[in-house]
């Protein structure tokens, strides 16, 4: 344990893991509530397309991924206002981004480990800049806490929220934009392939054992952070990829919650 904590890359990964797990637990409840898991997958693959472009240009992926993914989130929201369903617009973004990613990577003679790391995640790719960006996103997330009630209300009944004077469209755009930033931050650690699971599993587990949305949010954050730390240390000791270990621990938490729900019928 002490040997691991003496490694700079592992300490950076540990800090980033805790922060992105907090984000995933917090925003994941809205993904589950709204059945937006496909949106998370679409944004993840949009991020991968931009990362592939950054690899081709030999520049820092975050410089390209952040604006590209935010643009994708805005495009999905705009297409939704034009009458296209969320699934359809997300599917379009998913397909176009992956096609561009494949094209960009094919234009580079050698990309191997870089592309593999961003597809499946790697603790070795976490840098100090990622921590600064995560810290900034944490401050933005804290500043957005007053909007939690608006998002929860709109997720239950958007039309009723509009009739009550809620700025539903603006709040939805803000939520999707913050979700896009979380996905960009998570892609180095978790990888584009498993990001959706990282968002959905803790929130789904929390939903199994919660009778209120507030309790679901708190439990989702707790499950996400604890599972992420456990998975990271398991991967370090066993030698498995961190992303796979984290997601499998989250699967185990979900299985325990399903058992708890079946046994006690939500009497919590």
Image (tube, rainbow, N blue to C red):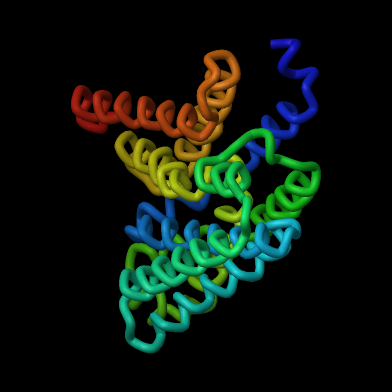
Quarter of the view holding residue 80: bottom left
Residue 255 at x, y = what percent?
Answer: 30, 27
Q: Is 239 on the left-hand or right-hand side of 31? A: right
- Quadrant of the image containing the C terminus: top left
Direction bottom: furthest residue:
82
Q: How many marks?
A: 0
Q: Is 52 on the left-hand or right-hand side of 43? A: right
Tell me which residue sits at (78%, 22%) in the image. 7
Residue 214 in view: no
Tell me which residue sits at (51%, 47%) in the image. 119
| Residue 39 vertical placement versus 24 (above, below) | below
Residue 53 in view: yes
| Residue 247 vertical placement versus 35 (above, below) | above
Foreground residue, 85 or 151?
Answer: 85
Direction top: furthest residue:
2
Foreground residue, 25 or 75?
Answer: 75
Direction front: furthest residue:
109
Tell me which residue sits at (60%, 42%) in the image. 113
Residue 223 at x, y = what percent?
Answer: 47, 32
Tell me which residue sits at (41%, 64%) in the image. 153
Foreground residue, 235 or 76?
Answer: 235
- Quadrant of the image containing the N terminus: top right
Q: Is 184 on the left-hand or right-hand side of 135? A: left
Quarter of the view holding residue 183: bottom right
Residue 196 at x, y = what percent?
Answer: 42, 49
Foreground residue, 160 or 73?
Answer: 73
Q: Is 267 on the left-hand or right-hand side of 127? A: left
| Residue 58 vertical placement versus 248 (above, below) | below
Quarter of the view holding residue 178: bottom right
């Amino acid at each position: 344990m002490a040997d691991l904590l003496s490694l700079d890359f592992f300490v950076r990964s540990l800090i980033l893991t805790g922060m992105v797990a907090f984000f995933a637990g917090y925003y994941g409840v809205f993904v589950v509530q709204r059945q937006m898991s496909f949106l998370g997958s679409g944004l993840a693959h949009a991020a991968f397309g931009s990362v592939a472009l950054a690899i081709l240009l030999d520049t820092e992926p975050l410089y390209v991924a952040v604006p590209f993914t935010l643009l994708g989130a805005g495009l999905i929201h705009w297409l939704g206002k034009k009458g296209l369903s969320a699934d359809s617009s997300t599917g379009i973004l998913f397909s176009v981004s992956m096609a561009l990613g494949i094209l960009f990577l094919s234009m580079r003679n050698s990309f191997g480990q870089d592309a593999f790391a961003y597809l499946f995640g790697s603790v070795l790719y976490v840098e100090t800049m990622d921590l600064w960006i995560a810290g900034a996103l944490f401050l933005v997330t804290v500043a957005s806490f007053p909007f939690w009630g608006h998002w929860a209300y709109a997720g239950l009944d958007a039309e009723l929220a509009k009739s009550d004077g809620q700025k539903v469209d603006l709040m939805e755009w803000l939520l999707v934009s913050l979700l896009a930033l979380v996905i960009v931050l998570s892609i180095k650690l978790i990888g584009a392939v498993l990001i959706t699971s990282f968002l959905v599993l803790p929130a789904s587990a929390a939903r199994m054992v919660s009778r209120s949305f507030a309790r679901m949010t708190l439990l989702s954050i707790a499950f996400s952070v604890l599972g992420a730390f456990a998975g990271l240390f398991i991967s370090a000791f066993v030698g498995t990829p961190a992303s796979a270990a984290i997601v499998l621990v989250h699967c185990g938490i979900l299985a325990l919650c399903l058992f708890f729900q079946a046994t006690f019928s939500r009497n919590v």
